[in-house]
Amino acid sequence: MSTTPATETLPLPHATDADLARVLELSERRPVFLYFTVPWCGPCREFGPRLQEYAASRSDVSMFRVDCDDSPAFASRFGITMYPTVLLLRHGDVHWTQTGALGPDALAATLDGIGGAAGGLDARASVDDACADAVTGSVTLPASLLD
């Protein structure tokens, strides 16, 4: 007999080197959090599920996972050399960076502070979905992220 959890956390959508230009374009219209990780990183394996759970609880800012081994150009563009690293892009520029894993409470407090109380993260299925929603204007951003 197997049991299924009551709620399932969806994985963060991946962004690859091929998505870099679209992610930068998306950040012109809405805040984008990028989670840089590698499969062999112990702290990343612990931090990733916490970040996924948090992202699943939010709805109006995009978040993507970047595997730095598979997407070296993406990682290089932002100077990523340590893992895990999370950064916030607005208008194509980095506005906040966190290197190293955060505990669950510190993660929520930090990202809530960055995203604003009304803001949030969007674990959409793909970069394409997030770009399409941003283009159609179906996203409301908190004023704190529009500066």
Image (cartoon, rainbow, N blue to C red):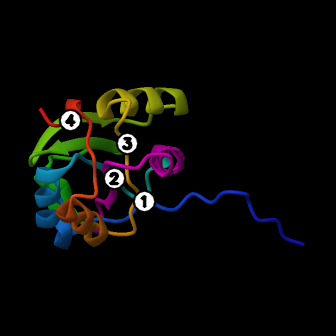
Name the residue that disc number 4 marks: 145
Q: CA distance from mark 3 to mark 2?
A: 9 Å
Residue 12: which disc?
A: 1
x 33%, y 69%: residue: 126
| Label 3 secondary element | loop
Judging depth in this view, the residue of 142 and 112 nearest the camera is 142
Say which of 25 and 74 sits in front: 25
Is residue 135 left or right of 114 when viewed as pictured?
left
Is the residue 2 above or below the residue 39 in the image? below
- Other-residue count near label 2 (Cα within 10 Å), few / some / many at <14 / 14–19 / ≥20: many
Magenta range:
43-70
Secondary structure under tag 2 reads strand
Residue type pointed to by label 4? Leu
Give the mark nearest the N terminus, 4 or 3: 3
Residue 127, percent from left and from top:
27, 67
- Look at 23% across and 41% down and name the residue there: 88
Say what secondary structure mark 1 lies in. loop
Residue at mark 3: 120
Disc nearest the viewer among 4 and 2 = 4
Which comes sooner in the sequence, label 3 or label 2? Answer: 2
- First in sequence, mark 3 or 1: give its number: 1
Asked if the residues shown at circle 1 and circle 2 are in contact, with their CB atoms under 8 angstroms apart, the answer is yes
The residue that label 2 is drawn on is 63
**Mark 4 and mark 3: Cα distance apart in space:** 11 Å
